[in-house]
Amino acid sequence: MKTRILTAVFWAATAVFAAPATAAAACEELTRLSLPYTKIDGAQIVAAGAFAPPPGGGGGGGQQAFAKLPAFCRVMLSIAPTSTSDIRVEVWFPESGWNGRFQAIGQGGLAGSIPYGAMAPALASGYATAGSDMGHVGNNANFMPQFPEKLVDFAYRAVHEMAMKGKAVIETHFGTAANRSYFNGCSGGGRHALTSAQRYPDDFDGIVAGASSWNSMVMDAARVGINRLVNRTATSAIPASKYPMIHRAVLAACDARDGVSDSVIENPMACRFDYASLQCRGADGPACLTAAQVQSAKALTSPLRHPITGAILFEGHLWPGSELEWDTLGGPEPLDNALRRIKNITYKDPNWDPVQFDTATDVELADKVDGGLLASNNFNLKPFFDTGGKLIVWHGWSDPQVTPQNSIIFFESVIRTVGRSARNSMELFMLPGVSHCNGGPGPDTFDKMTPLVEWVERGQKPTRIVASRVESGKVVRTRPLCPFGQVAKWKGTGSTDDEANFSCAAEPTNTRR
């Protein structure tokens, strides 16, 4: 299996220890492990509930998540595949109760820290886990103009190094390779997930890719272009105070279409709402949109087009149900992550002013300038599928940051490239009412790994995944997540807060507007 495939050259440079007498000794002895261009910065047992992330670390779920962790071995590595590389990786595994699997964790945004908060639940579930800062410190893009190799590390190399070195640490400690290796990431981590399947089909047996920001540079340029379009005049922007009014109108038109009024639009593709219906009949007011604001609403919810030719430059856009978070793309300034990459990669100028952005030329420029490093647009996943690899893609329909079509376009492009058989190894789940990676009014909490493990290890493809909405620590609603092309429909009896009373039914999937 893939977790056992390591080159002879790699293992020639790896010191393999005999199994030590105690877990504590095993962990501490890992400081003597020799790996190519890698320094072991430390290896220590962390007592149950005692871990606290360092200042500036990716804490994530708060100290409560760390307080529940079992005792584990924490191994810290510095990896330098090039003279300017400095990839920090941590590998954790439980002192007892390892489930025999490896779960690598993706890092979102601009990375720059170890994703401790996401590693914690993996460890708590019995996995050996690993996370990386993706080769730089700080959630920024300041390193990009001066250090092209660091950009390669950020784009894909850090995840591959994390996979290889993580597996080596695990095998050295346990005296056996992990039975299976998995990757789990969202947003930027979702892009890394897809990149791993494309570039290194042997690294992971199963991959979860959430809200993937593939096609990053085009998407970044489009997000800046949309922001400039919405803010084209002093009065064209929609005040945030009007978002709830717009949201209520959209829900009134489309919420009950699935048979349930629950403030969630189950299938935004079937919602056709004309923002002109909200146009003020007289003076501007809080309960209506000016003519200019109507055009801005349409700009946020339509593909970005070339200002002269009308050609579609970027198909992604916001969908009905996302109105409460329109400030992400339609606020006074462009989305920060997008702007930083455009400044530092496209223009190589951290002081570049977005008012200079020209949609007619700059989307195409952004697509070319990084040489495709952040595109992750190789749709031929046959090599990954041929190894038995399985891919679960998921995305929130109300995502205001990485537009939901990003995942749909990738999914459909893979099917066109590989053929319908691709769906034997890949599935897409869209989450109604869910924002970017989590949040929003829809059920956003679900077990991503168990369906993947069942698929990889037992051949049971997921046809329904249960998601929960949690408020104040309590589950208040459950709903089924259905494979793309199906939506959850209430059976007509029983509580509408119980997923058992819903079925997955086929519904058209036309994403063009």
Image (spheres, helix red, strand yellow):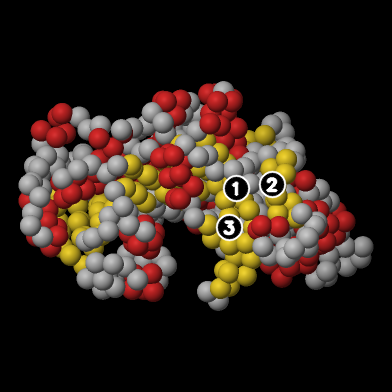
Query: What is the distance, in whole Å, between disc 2 and disc 1 at their CAs?
Result: 8 Å
Quadrant assignment for the N terminus: top left
Badge 2 element? strand
Residue, disc 1: 464
Indicate which disc residue 504 carries.
2
Answer yes or no: is residue 195 visible: no
> Is there a contact, CB below 8 Å, between mark 2 and mark 1?
yes
Badge 1 element? loop
Q: Does label 2 or label 1 sit earlier along the sequence?
A: 1
Task: Categorize mark 3 by other alpha carbons within 10 Å: few (<14), some (14-19), many (20+).
Answer: many
The image quadrant of residue 388 is top left
Residue at horizontal 36 percent and vertical 39 percent from the top: 204
Residue at horizontal 55 percent and vertical 76 percent from the top: 472
Q: Could you say where residue 397 lies in the image, as x and y percent from the top left? A: 64, 51
Answer yes or no: is residue 389 visible: yes
Residue type at the position of mark 3 = Ala
